Amino acid sequence: MKENRIRILYIDDEIHNLNAFKASFRRSYEIYTATSAQEGKLLLKEIMVHIIIADQKMPVSTGVEFFNEIKDTLPDPMRILLTGYTDVEDIIDAINKGHIYSYIKKPWDEHELHKTINNAYEIYRTRKQLREKIEELEKTNDELNRFIYSTSHDLRSPLMSVLGIINLSRLDNSIVDPNGYMNMVETCVLKLDDFIQKIIEYYRNSRLEVEYERIDFNTLLNDCITAFKPQNTQILFQTNVDQAVDFRGDTFRISVILNNLISNAVKYQKPEETNPMVNLSVKVEPHKATICIRDNGIGILSEHLNNIFKMFFRSKNNNKPGSGIGLYIVKEALSKIGGTINVESKYGEGTQFEITIPNRNEFDT
């Protein structure tokens, strides 16, 4: 079997049509023939063909019926139908359903059929190449994501060891550090660890299936506040949760969203602010939950508002540049659970994020 030739299976119950097709095209293509749909199916189990041509009017199974039967098990070969004028409406319906590439009227014109075969083969090749590229990209993407995830986990271990050594040196006073170099090292390690954790969050968000469970927003907000309050003990956290109905959502992704937004609200406070504040409110309704996170921090420049959800975008208007991935992860996590986010900010006055998340309680009881 020569791989560089177009392989065609032609099915027709009239022997003289099969012979005429062979005589006309055997020099151009590798041709296989069958006198019935059943015989054609048997041949297709043994031979991989690029194009299948079938006559519409066959006694046991028409050409359209045959193509409908094989469209799921053999989706790749291009399908061409031979038909008389009386079958046009059926053929148009079959083509609209995507089962047939084209049809040729009988008696066929040799030039037209030759052109149709070659055009069909070009589409076959293009589809195959596209599918191979997609598979290759999916494999590469999967390998890259796994590498990043694995590397991120491996990097955290030595970072935690460095932090442990720093804490030990402080406990036994074995190191004199008048210039505060150890504090600088600790700050850099914590910054790198924060970036690594965000990479892990991104990977988990892209890979984990969405799982819905009941969420108590009072508990969830308190857990988030407990995690970030030590970073700035001067901040007054105000919470207001109105949850008169049950809420079901993806705990992991909602936690990721809240943690990133609260982390930013804490990180980007104004150094000179005497009353730093972060206000958190939640209103749960039967079909959604609306979450507002408002702070009186440094705010965001208006020209940056359209870019803050882009990966690795960093605002230049503060002395605490972030990783540029936190808000991107927020947007991606919301996309996974069907949520939306809006932001309002005035530079020098503060920022408010409003999030809307569907309540799956009424759908997943």
Image (spheres, rainbow, N blue to C red):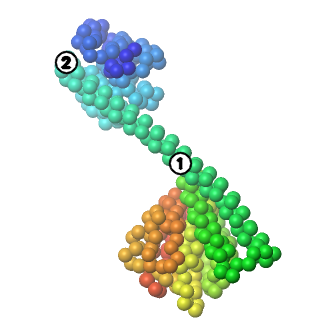
User: What residue is at 64 percent from the left and 71 percent from the top?
Assistant: 185
Lower position in the chain sequence, tag 1 or tag 2: 2
Quadrant where the image shows the C terminus: bottom right
Quadrant where the image shows the N terminus: top left
**Left or right: 166 in relation to 139:** right
Residue 112 can be seen, yes or no: yes
User: What residue is at 49 percent from the left and 67 percent from the top?
Assistant: 324
Tell me the distance, in whole angstroms, between the alpha carbons under discs 1 and 2: 51 Å
Q: Which residue carries the number 1 mark?
A: 144
Picture disc at residue 110: 2
Amino acid tagged 2? Glu
Residue 197 is situated, as x and y percent measured from the top left of the image, at: 61, 62
Residue 306 is situated, as x and y percent measured from the top left of the image, at: 39, 70
Q: Image quarter for residue 116?
A: top left
Residue contact between numbered discs 1 and 2, judged by CB atoms under 8 Å: no
- Nearer the observer: mark 1 or 2; the answer is 1
Residue 292 can be seen, yes or no: no
